[in-house]
Amino acid sequence: MKAEIICIGTEILLGQILNTNQQWLSLKLAELGIDVYYQSAVGDNPGRLARAIKQGLLRSDIVITTGGLGPTVDDITLEAISDALSKRLIYNKKIAGKIKTHFGGQCLNMPPGNLRQAHIPEGAKVLENDVGTAPGFIVDQAGKMLIALPGPPRELDPMFERYAMPYLKKKAKSDWIIKIRTINITGLPESAVDRKVKDLLESPPPVTVGIYAKPALIELKITAKAKNEKAAKVLIDRVDRKITARLKGCIFGRDSETLEGAAGKILAAKHKTLAIAESCTGGRISDRITNVPGSSGYFRMGVVVYSNDAKMSQLCVSPGTIYKYGAVSRQTALEMAKNVREISGADIGLSVTGIAGPGGATKSKPIGLVYIAIAMPEKTIWREFHFRGEREVIKFRSSQAALDLLRRSL
Amino acid sequence: MKAEIICIGTEILLGQILNTNQQWLSLKLAELGIDVYYQSAVGDNPGRLARAIKQGLLRSDIVITTGGLGPTVDDITLEAISDALSKRLIYNKKIAGKIKTHFGGQCLNMPPGNLRQAHIPEGAKVLENDVGTAPGFIVDQAGKMLIALPGPPRELDPMFERYAMPYLKKKAKSDWIIKIRTINITGLPESAVDRKVKDLLESPPPVTVGIYAKPALIELKITAKAKNEKAAKVLIDRVDRKITARLKGCIFGRDSETLEGAAGKILAAKHKTLAIAESCTGGRISDRITNVPGSSGYFRMGVVVYSNDAKMSQLCVSPGTIYKYGAVSRQTALEMAKNVREISGADIGLSVTGIAGPGGATKSKPIGLVYIAIAMPEKTIWREFHFRGEREVIKFRSSQAALDLLRRSL
């Protein structure tokens, strides 16, 4: 089955909102084995919208619309669908009751426009809205299906997953599905990853590999088209093993696994505790570590020592070290890591000091120069990095390198 | 003039990447006074792509394509445009020279496929690619314009701004432009903001107001259509003044101004220094404060005291306070703020303690309970909050509330 997605709203065409529904729905449809051939966005214009829907029903089996189901005069999706399908809009008492209850529950006066939302095209199946008032619906006839969903992701996502997906699964009876696995890599530039998996990037369907580069993060996406989940997994596992063999230590996780999650998992498994001393990253590493639920089990404390004074008073970095080598130096990083470990009583001390810019650079110490050190019971290690980018990018790259070094040294 | 945007790439239809080009280009076109009537995405299929381009040229004055200009076999935009316009592709020596130089400069062997990129349709104007190898181009004839741009934003954005925008500006000679100003608000729920500006949200063109809610952040976007920048500014200023009068203290900035930037600006102007003690926010506030260039001028230090031990050893919070009132209490927050101020020698001490979840809650202290305190020379203040959401959302909401309280108390 072929599908297309039509997102409705002049605010999309004006660039006032980032349209994330298309990606979200496309991923879900791929899981169901439904091909998406077109995505489009049209404004709140009845004629253009009705034409887009008619065209969609001519060239695709399934048309999914998002948006325009609300109570205001701009919300014209109901009328446009009624026009495109030549179907009357019917007042649905059950929906009207739910809308009234919704307002009653919040002790609000219902604006009269809200009862427009209680209409659906003749013969349509209602899709419940568990979060808001506007219901969605499915019109399914003569081998063509139209699914109307609300625009806000917090209403659309549960409605689609709970009510539209089971319906589509039964109807589509696709003889294939698509599965995607993302392999998350850091510590190598894109060109190096590209070279190592060049042949895999050219592998033909049913299992393909794509490379996506972000700052200090490379994603390899393995996409398999197969007749069921199990067959897709076999195809993906085969490629995953090849990639793993070639990139080993640089892979920190799969799919939604984060670097801080990966580091935390090892800390928890090894019963090690951590303390962090940050200068140029300004708290980013502690923030990321504490995004992981359960991190209070291994994270002892963090200090953000932005000034030389703070480095000396909070971390007892010796004035001589800062005077002789500078605050951005291997020596200062090492003292920071050792001392934060000692002060906190943690097993591991991690430190970062560097120049994030735009100020603070000198000839011998340019923007992007960063030292990272890790103090462990048995040894202390350090690395020097030269990062490029704006202030926030350098902070992020530094946090990525620090968490990666932590993960590897465990 | 009416424009439409066609984004090309099967990876978009599979949901493998979030398409941000449509929003970016739509905003730029609005600035130029060019109406966008359709956005669409099609895959790497020659027939469907050529049809989409032909349809676009029938119904719009300007068709902008993005993607598919690279060197691989999937990159079919050149051929599809040549097909749709019935124009031959011409080998361009100058482009070929630039591509060869690009590879030479990086000491790389050029794959032969890369010279495909040296072709452009007969009569097209080349758009330079200052970042990558694939040039863009404009075909402009018989009152219709086709602009082909590369897919990666880091190549597309500078190419469009430097080379396509000046051309469009001259050609479009629009008798109007669109300007948008965003007013950033925190500390009020969406429904409260909505109530205060209800009449403005319904104001008719040429100046409209939209409301966009994110966690702990409400944006009011004022959009004006006018004959030039100055006229648009007058229209926007008038509405801005009304909104400001009604929401005063809850407005922390406009357009890209952040809460941490607003707080930092006041700290710098008043020559005040800051120290931060964080528990449940885990470093998020220090991280945000240090995202602002120049923050080293006022930010003394931060501590992330995740455990009770760290609260006592690093911040000298009295064991009695923690034992009697708990780590998540007004009393602990107050001691944290006072002590971090004293230890650091900063003018202002800011503290946060709370329960971000999913663990750590008790009957009397549920997930989302957060105390924020600020110690100043003349007084110490505190607030109790109850936030909803996942762990990371609670961390973010807490950091928003803390920065907002800091900004207001200055």
Image (cartoon, coloured by chain):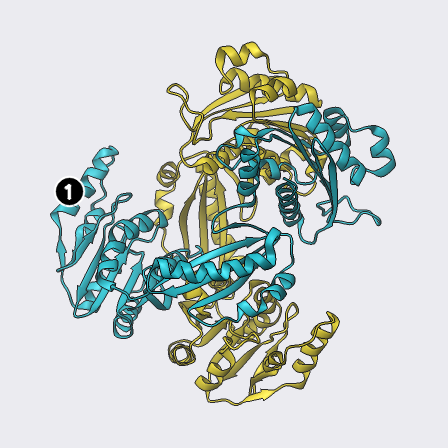
Chain colours: A cyan, B yellow
Q: Nearer the viewer, residue A250 or A332?
A: A250
Residue type at mark 1 is Gly
Q: Which residue is mark 1?
A: A97
> Alpha-carbon neighbours of circle 1 within 10 Å: few (<14), some, or many (≥20)?
few
Kindly tell me whether residue A54 is visible in this rendering.
Answer: yes
Left or right for A342, reference B197: right
As drawn, A49 above or below B197: below
Residue B7: percent from left, percent from top? 46, 69
Q: Chain of mark 1?
A: A
| Image position of B55 (left or right of B77) | left
Quadrant showing the C terminus of chain A: top right
Check the picture and name the quadrant holding the N terminus of chain A: bottom left
Q: From the viewer's perspective, is B88 left or right of B12?
A: right
Residue B17: in sight, yes or no? no
Query: Number of labelled discs?
Result: 1
At x 35%, y 46%, the residue is A154
Question: Where residue B337 sits in the image (x, y, percent)?
Answer: 60, 21
Secondary structure at numbered mark 1: helix
Instruction: Give above or below for B268 relative to B21.
Output: above
Viewer-nearest residue: B106 or A54: B106
Q: Is residue B41 above or below residue A321?
A: below
Residue A102's quadrant in the figure? top left
Image position of B106 with respect to A283: above or below: below
The residue under the point 46% across, 30% down is B356
Hey, which quadrant is residue B263 in on the image? top right
**At which x and y percent is residue B352?**
54, 26
Measured as percent of width and height from the top left, residue B342 is found at 68, 19
Of the pair B43 and A155, the residue shown nearer to us = B43
